[in-house]
Image: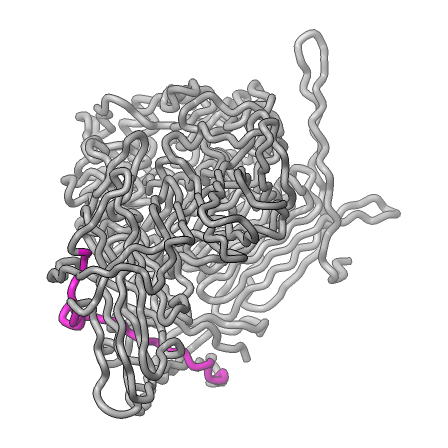
Amino acid sequence: MPNVVDVRFEYHEAKEIGIGEDRPRISWSYSGEDQSWTQQSYTIEISRHGVTKTFDSDSDQCLFILWPTTPLLSMEVALVRVRASDKNGNATEWSDVARVETGLLNQDDWQCHLIEAETIEQTEGFNRPIVFRREFSLQKPIRRARLYVTAHGIYAAKLNGSSIGDHVLSPGWTNYTNRLTYQTYDVSSLVDHGLNTLHVTVAPGWYCGRLGWGAGKTNLYGSTLGLVALLRVECEEGDPILLGTDSGWQWGYGPTLSAEIYDGEVFDATQSLSQLTQWGSVACKPITDRLESPDGPPIRRTQEIQPIGILKSPSGQSIIDMGQNIVGWLRIKVSGGTAGHQIQLQFAEVLEDGECATRTLRNAKARDTVILDGQGTLEWEPDFTYHGFRYVGVDNWPGTLTTDSVKGIVVHTDMKKTGSFSCSNPLLNRLHENITWSMRGNFVGIPTDCPQRDERLGWTGDINVFADAGNYLYRTGGILKTWLDDLRYEQRRAGGIVPLVVPSVFEGFDQDAHAIWGDVSVMLPWSLYRATGDSQFLARQYSSMKAWLDVIPRRENRLWNYISEWKLGDWLDPAAPSDDCGKATTDPTFVSDTFLAHITTLMKSISEILGEKEDVQAYTVALEKIRSAFCHEYITPAGLVANCTQTAFALAIQFNLIPSEEQEQHAARYLSRIILESRYKIGTGFAGTPYIGHALSKVGLTDVFYRMLLSRKNPSWLYPVTMGATTVWERWDSMLPNGAINPGEMTSFNHYALGAVASWMHGFILGFRIEEAGWKTITIEPTPGGGLKWAEGEYLSGYGIYRVRWKITQDSEMQEESIWVEVRIPPNTAAKVKLPGLEEFKHVGSGSHSWKVPYQSTQWPPEPFVLPFGQREPFPVDESLPCPWDRNTE
C-alpha cells in the first residue's frame, strides 16, 4: 500500500503557523510504487480541544478537500491526519499528524495600536530605521508564546537579544492600501522568567522607501515608519497575557543609519544599542490597515555560497567573485580596524574592463557600508535591503581579505522546489540552471522583472510569459495568489485596465491597455489552475478576467484597436535597437490580436469549468468572430501570414489561427525557411519566445527547434551560456561578444522572461504534458533530438512524484540503436505514454514502467551551413555527458 504523505493546508508548508483561513482546504500526496493504485475513499481525522472526530468520503480526490467541520477560531490549533482506501477496501496506514494553527482572524483580535515615533529625523530625505522597544516581566511558567507582528516598513525583531524567526524582509511587498500581511512567530523558547526585552527595528522597505527608476517615488503608502505587534503568552495557569503595541513602548535609533531596497545599508557598529541609547515616547494610532495572514511561504535565506576567488581590478580594488549571479547579500566576518573605520561593499552582476559594472544599476547605489567599532571581530549582514550580484568590490578592508571572510546569502520566497531537468548536453543543463536561478532571484515577495537596478517591480508581462515554466520549477500557488489579489485590486481602481506593474507604482501605467501584460489576468490563473488543479484560481479571478476583456479597445471587427502612444508587443525582439526595445519586427497590433484570440479561447474553457453557461455561449460567438476577422486580415489563402517573422508564424500556428491543415503546413514551411535564412538564430521577443518551440513541434519541426535551441551565436539561448552567464539575461545580447555591456539603458543580467523556453524543454525533451488539471492525468511523450543521448526529470505534483528517464543505446555489434524509456507515476494518477518512433499510446497507472524499442536518431550534427562563395560553416558539436544512472538499461 502507498503511504499518505505531506498533509497540508491551502498553500502553506507544514512548518508555517498563524494561517489566515478558518476553513483551510486539506490536500495530501502519496509515496510508493504500487501498481495502478487509485484512491476510492478517504478518512480525515481532526482533533480539536482534546476531541477527535473522523470524516469519511467516497472520493478519489486528494487535493483541496473542503474543511469538513466547524470553522477554526482565532489562534486555534487542530491536529489532522489522513488515511485512504482502494477499490478493494484496503486501507493505508494513517499519515503523520499535521498541525494547523490559525492566526488572528478578526480585526478585533488586534488588542493593540499602530505606534510611531513622536519625533523623527530625516537622513538625506529618507527615513532612518528606528528601533521600537518594550520591556516586560513574566513570573509564571509559560506553555506557549506567539508574536503577531507587522510594520509600516520592513522589520527585524529580537527577543532578549535573539532573532525571532527565520523570515527576512518581512512583511514583504503587497499593495498596502489593499492589505498588509502580518507574521506569526513561535517565541516560546525565547521568553525568559523575569525581565524580557523585545526590540523591533523598522526600515523604509517598500512602504516609504524609493521605488522606481530615476528619482522614483518615496512615501508611496505613507511617510512614517510604524509597528503593529501583539505578544500573546499562555501560562500554565491563568488567562493569557497580552502585550500589544501601546504607549508602554519606546523608540530610539540603532546602528543602522540608512537602509533602502535599491541603495543598500549603512551600518555603524559604534551606535549599537546600549545603556547610552536614548529612548523616546511613541505615538499611538488606531489600526486602519486590513491585516491578513500571508497566503504562502515567507522570504528566507535559502542557501549560503562560498566565493570562488578574489580578483584585483586594474584600479586596485579587491573584487569578490561568487561564481554565481545571486540575489541576497554578503555576510562578512571582519577582525581588526579601529573605531570609525569604514568598509564599502559595491555589488555588481558583471565586470567590464575588469571593474565592477555599475552603469546597469542606473540610480541604484547597491552599496553596503559597514563602520567598525574597534571592539574585535564583527560578524554582520544587512536586514533591510537586497542585491543582485556575482561580484562585490571591496574598499578599505582591514588586513587581508580572504574567501573565508565572506559568504553569499541567497534570499527569495521559500517556495518548495518541484521540477528538475538534466540531459547529456552540459550547455542545456547550464541553461536550465540559469533559468532556475533567475526565477529564484526574481521571486522575492512578488514576481519581479529584475533584482538589481532601480526597478525590481512586478511587471505583469514577465510573469505571464514565464508562468508555465515557473509553475513546473516551484510550487508558486501561495506567492502568486497574493499577487493576483493585488492585481485584481489595482485593476478595479483602474476601471478594468491591468496595470503594467503590480503593485502599481507609476502614474500612467494603468491608463492604456496592453496585450500580454494585461492578458496576465486570464493566462496566469489558467496556468496555475492547470498546474495545481485548484479551480479557485479561476473563480477568484473571474471578474478580473471579464473586466479585462471588456475594457480592451476594439475595432468594429472585434480585433484590437491598439491606441496607446507607445506599444510593447514583441518586446525585446533581438532586431530592436538597443535604445528602443519596443521597435520589433512584428506588428504590435498583430501580436495583440493573436493573444486576444488566445485569451478568448481560454475564457470559453474557464466559463465552462465554472458553469457560467451564458458566458460560454458569449465567448464561443466572440471567438468565432475574432478568428474570422483575424484570418481575413492577416492570413493569405495559401497560408502566409501578414508579418513574415518568426513571432508572427509561431503565434498564428500555436494559437490555432490558421484555418486549414493545408494552410498551416504551408505556414510551417515558410517559418522553417525564415529560421534557416537566419542560420537558426532566434528572432523573437517577449511574445514569440515562449511559443516558437511549441509551434514548431506542433507542425512536426522539432528538429528545427533543436537547432535553434543549440545554436551558440548571438542571438540564441546558448550564447549567454558560452559567455559565462549563470542567470538568464534581459536582452539576448546584454553582453556583447567582445565583453562590452550592451549600450542600452535597460540591461539586466537576471531576467527570467526569455527563460520561458524551459516549458518546451519540460514538455518535449522530457515529454511531460498535463492532461487533467493538477497532473491528475498526464501525457509523457519524450522527443529526442539535437544529439542528446539521455535525459531525465522529476516533477513533484500535488499527488506525488512523476519521473521520466530515457536513454539511446547502440548495439556494439549490430550498430542498431534502441531507446530505453522509464516512467514513474505516483499513486492515484495515470498517464498516457508515447514512445519515440511508435504511434500508439500506452496507458499506465501508478508505479514504475519501462520499455526498450528500436530507434533511429536523426542526423547530428546537421549538415554545415553553405555560405556565399561556397564556404561552409559547421554546426558545433557539444560535449556529451555520461549517463549518471546506476540502473542497467540494457
Counting every numbered tag in the picture gives 0
Quarter of the figure with the C terminus: bottom right
- The front one of 257 and 635 is 257
Whether residue 450 is in magenta: the answer is no
Q: Where is residue 659 in the image (x, y as percent from the top left)?
A: 38, 31
Does 251 sit above or below residue 561?
below
Please identify the residue farthest to the top as the structure is shown. Answer: 869
Q: Where is residue 655 in the image (x, y as percent from the top left)?
A: 39, 36
Please identify the residue farthest to the left as the structure is shown. Answer: 286
Location of residue 713 (image quadrant): top right
Tell me which residue sits at (41%, 28%) in the image: 746
Q: Position of residue 832 (x, y in %)?
A: 53, 57
Q: Can residue 618 be seen in this view?
A: no
Whether residue 100 is in magenta: the answer is yes
Tell me which residue sits at (42%, 77%) in the image: 40
The answer to whether 876 appears left or right of 63 in the picture is right
- The front one of 223 and 624 is 223
The answer to whether 639 appears left or right of 853 in the picture is left
Quarter of the figure with the N terminus: bottom right
- The front one of 842 and 215 is 215
Q: Position of residue 25 (x, y in %)?
A: 31, 70
Task: Provide the residue span drawn in magenta.
Answer: 91-117
Q: Is residue 195 visible?
A: yes
- The front one of 803 and 392 is 392
Does 703 sit above or below residue 795?
above
The answer to whether 823 appears left or right of 173 in the picture is right
Tell me which residue sits at (62%, 41%) in the image: 428
Tell me which residue sits at (28%, 44%) in the image: 209
